[in-house]
Amino acid sequence: MTTQDAPYLPVRSAIPKTIAIKGARTAEDFAHYDKSKKRKLMARKAIRGTLGILGLLIAWHLMSVAYDLQLILPTPWAVLRRVAGMLMMDTNRWLYGPDVYTHLAVSFQRAMIGFGLAAILAIPLGLLIGRITSVREFVQPIITAFYPVPGIAWIPLAILWFGLSDKAVIFVVFMTAFFPLYYSTEAGARQINPILIDAGSCFGAKGLSMFYYVVLPATVPHITTGMRIALGGAWRMIVAGEMLASSQGIGYMLMEARFHFRAVDLMTAMILISIIGYLTELLIVRIIEKRTVEKWEVKTT
């Protein structure tokens, strides 16, 4: 029988030999095994993470009580009760102008605008400079010169330029988020394996098609890493900017709580920042990763 006469063998016929190592006999068994393994991994992470947080809360409580530090280090229970009271809009002890949801909304809006503007500029610029050497040689020294300037150093200049307004806070968030996004993207675009570029050229990719099918997918893991770092920096700078240049926002609450010597409100505001920052990272970066890195099965090596 010639090769042309040979019956077509589906790809699945080659699977059982590989899957047998895992104790499965069919592709469906392998898929079930893979899902079960992922569920166990997620459960293990959740349990260990919960135990870690409980350990921290216990150590926090013991330190507060043992050294009688409730005035400057309230117990976790006192802080959690205050968090619940703020979220339920308890106005009996409210000293900070608008309700907490207004402050959170203002801070969130400023953080997202500053982060979004930084991403719009930094990611395309990083891709361009990472792939075109001549452009890199012109632009890289300028960016390197500004990079060592800390974000908080831009606050006085921002106040001078924009006054005590949203624009001043957004500007310092932009300056803080820009550099992690740029450097992560530039490094990812510059370090693409030349074999991938050659393979794309062999299949006729060039110009925009090369960018869309080769450069962008290979750089996405680096971009999401930069996003994660930039979001953390954006929330840190939001607090600093609002403490000095705003009369609204979670940073303003922190400063006012310090003036009133209310440590429980200080720590409550910090926990609220932590929660909203985590949710922001989860909703933005994780969604992008699921729709790009995991969907395309991109690997950095």
Image: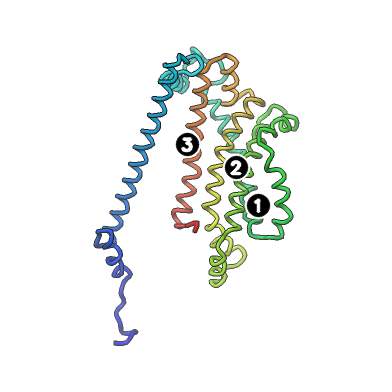
Outermost residue to the front:
67
Of the image marks 1 and 2, the number of the one nearer the N terminus: 2
Q: Residues within 10 Å of mark 3 (few under 14, many from 20)?
A: few
Where residue 135 sits in the image (x, y, percent)? 71, 57
Q: Is residue 9 left or right of residue 234?
A: left
Q: Which kind of residue does numbered mark 2 sit on?
A: Gly
Outermost residue to the top:
92
Q: Nearer the viewer, residue 98 or 52?
A: 52
Observer-side mark, 1 or 2, equals 1
Q: Nearer the viewer, residue 278 or 41?
A: 41
Q: Residues within 10 Å of mark 1 (few under 14, many from 20)?
A: some
The residue to which callout 3 is attached is 279
* Quadrant of the image occupied by residue 42: top left
Q: Residues within 10 Å of mark 2 (few under 14, many from 20)?
A: some
Q: CA distance from mark 1 to mark 2?
A: 14 Å
Q: Is residue 64 left or right of residue 169?
A: left
User: Which mark, residue 77?
Assistant: none
Question: Would you place residue 62 above or below residue 120 in this image?
Answer: above
Where residue 116 sits in the image (x, y, percent)? 60, 42
User: Which mark, residue 125?
Assistant: 1
* Residue depicted at x 55% and y 30%: 105
Q: Which kind of residue does numbered mark 1 sit on?
A: Leu
Q: Which kind of residue does numbered mark 3 sit on?
A: Leu
Q: Is residue 43 left or right of residue 144?
A: left
Of the image marks 2 and 3, the number of the one nearer the N terminus: 2
Secondary structure beneath dot 3 equals helix
Question: Would you place residue 260 above or below residue 134 in this image?
Answer: above
User: Which mark, residue 116?
Assistant: 2
